[in-house]
Amino acid sequence: MRLCAVDLACHRGGRDVFAGLSFAVSSGEALAITGRNGAGKSSLLRTIIGLARIAHGSLTLEGGDPELTIPEQAHYLGHQDALKPSLSVGENLQFWANFLGAADAQIRVALAAVGLEDLTDLPAGYLSAGQRRRLSIARLLAVKRPLWLLDEPTSTLDANAQNRLTTLLEAHLSGGGLVLAATHGPIGLGSVRELRLEDAQPPTPVEMAAS
């Protein structure tokens, strides 16, 4: 499987956020999207998941399910943890599993993987910021999808939770998954390529560099 972007551009708020952007990520690879605030890191992920319109260029997922769109084969972990505070931890995860159409979601396995198995019945409104982030990460595990789009995935996570996340990322990659992570810092993986975005005024082509 291979995610390919060719001459990609995104236009928001009356300006070109980025343009001339080309890259490719294959199964088992992770790509760290870096750059200053406002350079377009989050906008790139939102473009891939279909929340922002492609102004120019093309985006394809080679080797994916031809009957499904790219967003239908991807998980998006945004800045905010989309949780209902009145629902329990388990109910929140089950809601997302139902929404994503997973009849065989691994709810308890996913909660155990992020260390929340003992809080299944606790209302999500009582969770700390780090626990809410871990519950959002559990969604990646409960419903299997090959492409993970992560926006500052380590935000609010303590050292132990960051180590758990690294283990989950490594397992996803070893199983043939793809990871794109917008980040200001390291995500704990040993081998990561970097795609650096510059503040696009005016837009300039972007190249990938090994790190």
Image: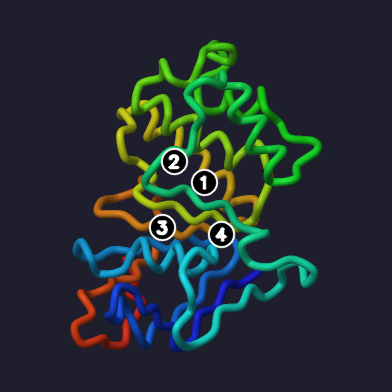
**Mark 1 vs 2: CB contact within 8 A:** yes
Dot 2 lies on which element?
helix
The reply to whether dot 4 and dot 1 touch (C-beta < 8 Å) is no
Q: Using the image, tell me which numbered label, if any, was put on residue 170.
A: 1
Q: Relative to 12, is 62 on the left or the right?
A: right
Which residue is label 3 attached to? 191
Q: Earlier in the sequence, mark 2 or mark 3?
A: 2
Q: Earlier in the sequence, mark 4 or mark 1?
A: 1
Q: Nearer the viewer, residue 60 or 42?
A: 42
- The span from disc 3 to disc 1 (Cα, nearest Å) is 10 Å
- Local crowd at mark 2 within 10 Å, few (<14), some, or many (≥20)? some
How far apart marks 4 and 1 lie (CA) works out to: 10 Å
Is 197 drawn above or below residue 142 in the view shown? below
Q: How is the image coloured?
A: rainbow
Residue 18 location, quadrant: bottom left
Q: Which residue is mark 2?
A: 166
Of residues 188 and 40, the one drawn nearer to the viewer in this rendering: 40
Q: Residue placed at 45% from the left, 31% from the top?
A: 134
| Residue 149 vertical position relative to residue 201 in the rendered view, above or below | above
At 58% from the left and 15% from the top, the residue drawn is 120
- Whole-angstrom CA distance, mark 2 to mark 3, is 12 Å
- Residue density around tag 3, few if under 14, some if 14–19, many if 20 or more, within 10 Å: few
- Please name the residue shown 80% across and 69% down the image: 67
Judged from the image, the secondary structure of the residue bearing numbered disc 4 is: strand
Disc 2 to disc 4: CB gap under 8 Å: no
Find the distance from the CA under tag 2 to the CA under tag 4. Answer: 14 Å
Q: Give the camera-side residue of 196 and 125.
A: 125
Asked whether, in this view, residue 114 is left or right of residue 191, the answer is right
Q: CA distance from mark 1 to mark 2?
A: 6 Å
Whether residues under marks 3 and 1 lie with C-beta atoms below 8 angstroms apart, the answer is no
Quadrant of the frame with the N terminus? bottom right
Residue underneath mark 4: 178
